[in-house]
Amino acid sequence: MKYLENLNDQQIEAVKSKEGATLLFAGAGTGKTTTIIARVFHLIKSGVSPKNILLMTFTNKASKEMLSRIEKSGVPSLPFVGTFHKFGNKFLLKHIDSFKERNSNFRIIEYSEIKQIIKELLKSRGAEKIFSPDEIINLISKMKNSNIYFDEKDKIITPNINKELFIELYRDYEMVMKKSNFIDLDDLQLLTYRILQKSFDIRNRYSNQYQYIMIDEFQDTNRVQYEIIKLLLTSHNNIFVVGDDDQSIYGWRGAEVENILKFEKEFRAKSLILNRNYRSSKPIIETANSLISYNNFRKEKSMISHRGDGLKEAVKYFELEDDEVEAEFVVKEISKLLKNGVEESEIAVLYRINSLSQNLEKHLLQNRIKYQIKGKSSFYSRLEIKEIITYLNAIVYPHNDMIFINALKETYGVGTQTINRLIEIQNGISLFETIKQENLSFYFKTRARYLITLVEKIEALSVEMENFVESFEELFDIRKKYSKYEAKSETKEDREKYKERVQNIDNFYSNMKRFLSENGNLLEFLNLHKIDENEDEKESITLLSIHLSKGLEFQHVFIIGMNDGYLPHYNSFESEEERRLAYVAFTRAKDRLYLTSSKYRTVFGKKQKSEPSRYLFEAEVLKGKLQIQKKSEKYKSEDYVIHKKFGVGAIKGVSKVGSETYLEIEFFGDHSVRKLTSSVIERLN
């Protein structure tokens, strides 16, 4: 049987596990996908019809890869392989008429349409200045993913929103959706569950059809997905789930790591472990094992490297003076790797906070190293930074009409009609000179002053000025403008958006000021930021957030910002998930893992002292014991506590792991039992 060739004993045992419930813990780089596909082949070879196999994945990319590999094997027909959303869509097209709240001509609406509906509902209730549409949309989505409908008032928890108002908005939203025969992406799952729950005949039919159910990335399932799976097992218990609790990093969007941890007991499942890592060398795996062992709420296991010792000093840590020096150092190390023949595509820089990419981009540009940023636009293509760069280009090239027109477009009071009229009266000279020489009030009346003011600002600035950056801001007021937007914002969402833009401007000004003081050349500074050439480069360094790195691998991985407050993030309420995030980052590296921190970090333009990440001690990269000052508080069973996400609950158990106190809490809202650190809990008197 060729599909069993090149599999290790652990994988073969998993592949041959046919009947009953099986839970396969598959660590990072352990050949999970190969095992899943081999099991599909094994089922078909043993006489199972492909139409009786249901394989759920969490991304379209994963399902396409698996389908492609299954199809190439020459099987007689293909099983269903797809996401929960794809399954839900197929299911609802057949059965939504039975629900009577929609019909099979339903339309799946986009986020922008949902946002417009919520905006109108907020306005109708006079709450448009109290809550942002995104807040309400995210909370509705969270409720649906938790299998909570608007009429289940006791289960609804709204930490930062008036509960009664939210319930009314949730109900109104559902009424609009039903009336228009719309469904959203969450409905693809929630309505599927409700139909399966309501109709025994439909439930039994699907359970009989899909005699062998497989779920990939089980640690990422949410509540409603878990309940759908249970309903599909009405007539049998042939369920095979694959996942890794140590890589559960999506709690913020509804995933419940508890699903994989309670599966073994609830489904009477056989538990298997794939722990032979084929990706990373031994020192990297040992570092990752040491780190994740500090998590208490997990299945006890350790990965073993199949690759052996690997390179000398496979895990390297560097503490730099500040974030500027850190970025410069990382780029120098990257340059060395490239000179030694390492391909650009095998190098990645990971970070917990997106803004850390800024200094890296600057130094990569200076060294003419191609890079791409996964999941977001380049720092220099952000709206507020592009606005600054547009004016700076006009200062350097005032007589280049194309550049000057871009500056006109950014200027308040100047629109397309004004620009076109200016071009009409232009007579063989630049638009800049046209504004200086013509009697503009004859052509534009009130608009003339906006054009003249722009020219006066440009002429007032000299690129060789000692305080160029301060003078530029004083004349163009870009930072001041966004600060005003922040102050006037009526929603939390808008305040955060403009606050981030102000911070980006501060960082840009800080870098420009430093560059000009060292080089004095604005033209060279601007040339470094022609970033369009770096977009979507296949042969380039990859910069990305840790969340987006899951499932990827690189020979050389740099993790920057290994400081407390950055990783772990200062705003993280679930320390175990944050540690899992660091674990995922560590296990992306195949040959070498570089970890960097800095003694000082720039926050809103000011340097602040920063401590090395506690994870460096837990991973035994730094020796000694990290001293963390914590509020001394004793907890006991049946104490009432509150958590800002899960609400009020009662303590059922207390345990200590090192310096951490873990509380097992039953929350009243959804009756869940969770194990959390005491640092994220407040006692109720």
Image: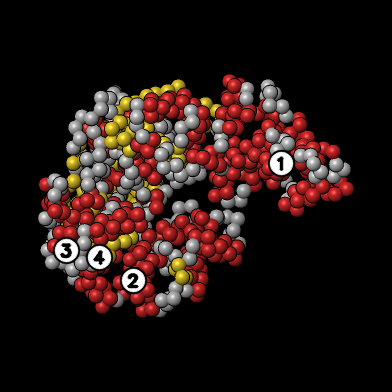
Measured Cα–Cα span from mark 4 to mark 1: 59 Å
Query: Camera-side residue: 276 or 171?
Result: 276
Q: Could you tell me which residue is drawn at 79 percent across and 39 percent down?
A: 429
N-term mark: 4 or 3: 3
Separation (CA) of disc 1 from disc 3:
68 Å
Instruction: Identify residue for label 3.
Output: 44
Residue 258 coordinates in the image, percent (x, y): 28, 52
Instruction: Specify the amino acid type for callout 1.
Output: Asp
Q: Which residue is mark 2?
A: 91
Amino acid identity at mark 3: Ile
Percent position of residue 225, x then y: 31, 61
Please, which colouring scheme is shown?
Answer: secondary structure
CA neighbours of label 4 inside 10 A, class few (<14), some (14 to 19), many (20+): some
Task: Give the CA separation, mark 1 to mark 2.
Answer: 58 Å
Q: CA distance from mark 2 to mark 3?
A: 24 Å
Residue type at numbered disc 2: Phe
State left or right for residue 512 relative to residue 545.
Answer: right
Q: Secondary structure at mark 3?
A: helix
- Read off the residue under disc 1: 401
